[in-house]
Structures are given as C-alpha cells and as structure tokens.
Image: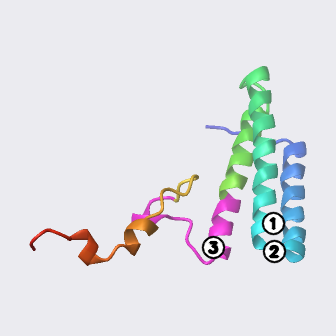
Amino acid sequence: MITTPATNGVADAIADIEKRRLTTETEAGLAMAFSAALHRLRELLDHETEALRLRGPASAHPANVEAVSAEIGRVRKLRAIMAGGSPRGPMGRPASRSGGRSLAPYERQSSASIHKGKSI
C-alpha cells in the first residue's frame, strides 16, 4: 500500500507543537507541557478529520490524520515514560485513555473487614 506523506502544513504544525511542548516543559513543568501539546494535537486531529469528511479520501487528509494520530501516540508514550511509568497498563495491556477505575477503596479494606462474619 502506497501512503502519501502528510502535507507540509500539518508537518509544520506538528513540529511547532513539539517546539512549544519543549519550551513549556522548561517554563511550567512536564504535566502542563504534555497536557497542552495533547490538547493542540487533538484540535489538529479534529480539524483534519473534519476536512477528510468534507473532501473525501482522495485528498491529502488521510495522511494528515495518520500523521497527527501517530504524533498523539508518541507524545502519550513519552509522557508515560517521563512520568516514570510505562505506556502499558496492568497485565501488559496498553493504558486506556480514560485511565480506568481506581482500586484504592478496595485496597484500604483490611482482610478482617472483608471476611467479617464468615468462617474461614
């Protein structure tokens, strides 16, 4: 399958977002830098997805959508690595976008309260 490269405008926008992320990282910290970069990338993805919907797959927009999606994935992985975590969630599965449910309330229960009234 032959894929066309992303347009120069999208490639430049991605590079600009990365440059801003690095600047924001030194000025405001990692969390703010990654949050802002992902926000801008999602806006760009929304714009390119809408352009693809309006103009169809014969335009350059499928390559643009693919490039922006790949950059979002790269930034998410980098955020996880820089935060000291892993881009993979529990059991080696990819981490979900929503972050999943916390087990903290269950971890606070003692084994005595869990088995209260039961003979073991």
Kindly identify which numbered label has been placed on residue 33. 1
The x and y percentages for residue 19 are 89, 64
Quadrant of the drawing holding the C terminus: bottom left
Residues at circles 2 and 1 in contact by the CB criterion of under 8 Å: yes
Residue situated furthest left in the rendering = 119
Question: Of discs 1 and 3, which sits in the foreground?
Answer: 1
Secondary structure beneath dot 3 equals: helix
- Decide which of tag 3 and tag 2 comes sooner along the chain: 2
Please give left or right for residue 76 compared with residue 40 in the image.
Answer: left
Q: Is residue 93 visible?
A: yes
Secondary structure at numbered mark 2: loop
62 is higher (above) or lower (below) than 96: above
Looking at the rendered structure, the secondary structure element under dot 1 is helix
- Image quadrant where residue 32 sits: bottom right
Question: Is residue 61 placed above or below 67 in the rendered structure?
Answer: above
The residue under the point 75% across, 55% down is: 38
Q: Position of residue 82 (x, y in %)?
A: 68, 75
Q: What is the number of the mark on residue 23?
A: none
Q: Residue 32 versus residue 118: which sits nearer the camera?
A: 118
Left or right of residue 6, residue 9 in this image: right
Q: Nearer the viewer, residue 63 or 14?
A: 14
Q: Amino acid at mark 2?
A: Gly
Q: CA distance from mark 3 to mark 2?
A: 15 Å
According to the image, label 2 marks what residue? 29
Residue that mark 3 sits on: 81
> Disc 1 and disc 3: Cα gap in Å?
14 Å
Spatial distance from mark 2 to mark 1, Cα to Cα?
6 Å
- Amino acid identity at mark 3: Ile
